[in-house]
Amino acid sequence: MADQIFQKVADLQAQIAQANPTTPEALEAFRIQYLGTKGAIKEVFKYFKEIPNERKKEFGQKMNALKEFANQHFEHLKSQIESAGEQQEGADLDLTAPGEPLPLGARHPVSLTLNRIIDIFKKLGFSIAEDREIEDDWHNFTAMNTPEDHPARDMQDTYYLRNSTEMLLRTHTSSVQARTMMRQKPPIRIIAPGRVYRNETISARSHAQFHQVEGLYVDKDVSFADLKQTLLFFAREMYGEKTKIRLRPSYFPFTEPSAEVDVTCFICDGDGCNICKYTGWVEILGCGMVDPAVLKNVGIDPDVYSGFAFGMGIERQAMLQYKINDIRLLFENDARFLKQFSSAF
Ligand code: DAH
């Protein structure tokens, strides 16, 4: 009798080993048939009381092994069915189908203008120097030959950091001139684009933050003629082959002599329009020969080296170019405004 029962256990194990359900439904049927509360394994357990005492232990071990085997087989089948299912899902995926179109963003008009300026100066061998927006008084003012009592230092114009008379938000990218010359010996030929800050009332024409590009060229025998030629090249590349430039004497603490530069109005070609206020000229930048005092401040010998520098605002040029009549639009990031530049690059 006991032998017959042991045979049943062995038969059941063979039966389970052969079972090969391939769908989730068949697998569930398998589980119910063998592992369920009324399943075949539980049924065989019922014979326990008919096993003679001396073989009860052996029977218990066999039954445990059978249960263990059935569970493992179930898990194995389950993972097979699952991975087949995943492959099936993959098979439905058409990898050659065109993707969902991603809505294209647009470059900001300030970036568009800045990138054009950068590309032009790159052609002339200028490299890009970027530096901090939180600056100290020395690099922003003192090194740039701006005396203590200069109006540009006035609390009205400069954002000082809280409780500080030393640290400020740079008011111009000219601070990068000082940073670069302290770090690097001539020849130096850099442009420094970046954001600057001034404590100004925000209106259609001016903002408390804007962007500038600074230029600096220091070497032996750099002359005013080099400056003029560089700016003429820039103006022609930027505003068209026929563009003329005009230099007006001006004053900046860090350059001597200094000039402001106008270009012929690219809207009316110099005939006069409301953009150039009927003068035929638009002002685009300030420039000059680096003041020997600045060179001295940063440890460059002004008897050996000379240089020119210039600084221009980006927003104004972007506004002229794209006929934007309110500078605030450039900082509001209203998608309806920015979208209009999606075809520009
Ligand atoms: N830093 C001046 C400004 O913020 C612009 C400027 C003028 C920069 C003349 C220069 C320069 O490098 O030579 O208005």
Image: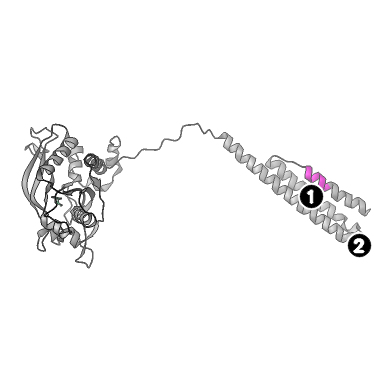
Q: Is residue 305 above or below residue 244?
A: below
Kind of residue sitting beneath label 1: Gly
Residue at image mark 1: 39
For mark 2, give the secondary structure.
helix
Q: Residue furthest right?
A: 1
Nearer to me, 84 or 222:
222
> Which range of residues does the magenta coloring cover?
12-19
Nearer to me, 210 or 130:
130
Q: Position of residue 238 (x, y in %)?
A: 19, 37
For mark 1, give the secondary structure.
loop
- Dot 2 or dot 1, earlier in sequence: 1
Q: Is residue 273 above or below residue 8?
A: above
- Residue at (78% x, 48% y) in the render: 34
Nearer to me, 216 or 236:
216
State the colouring used for the structure image. one colour
The disc label shown at residue 7, or none: none
Residue 69 visible somewhere in the drawing: yes
The residue at label 2 has a CB less than 8 Å from ligand 1: no
Residue 36 visible somewhere in the drawing: no
Residue at image mark 2: 54
Q: Main secondary structure of the magenta part?
A: helix
The residues bearing labels 2 and 1 have C-alpha atoms spaced at a distance of 27 Å
- Residue at (19% x, 36% y) in the render: 237
Identify the image quadrant of residue 180.
bottom left
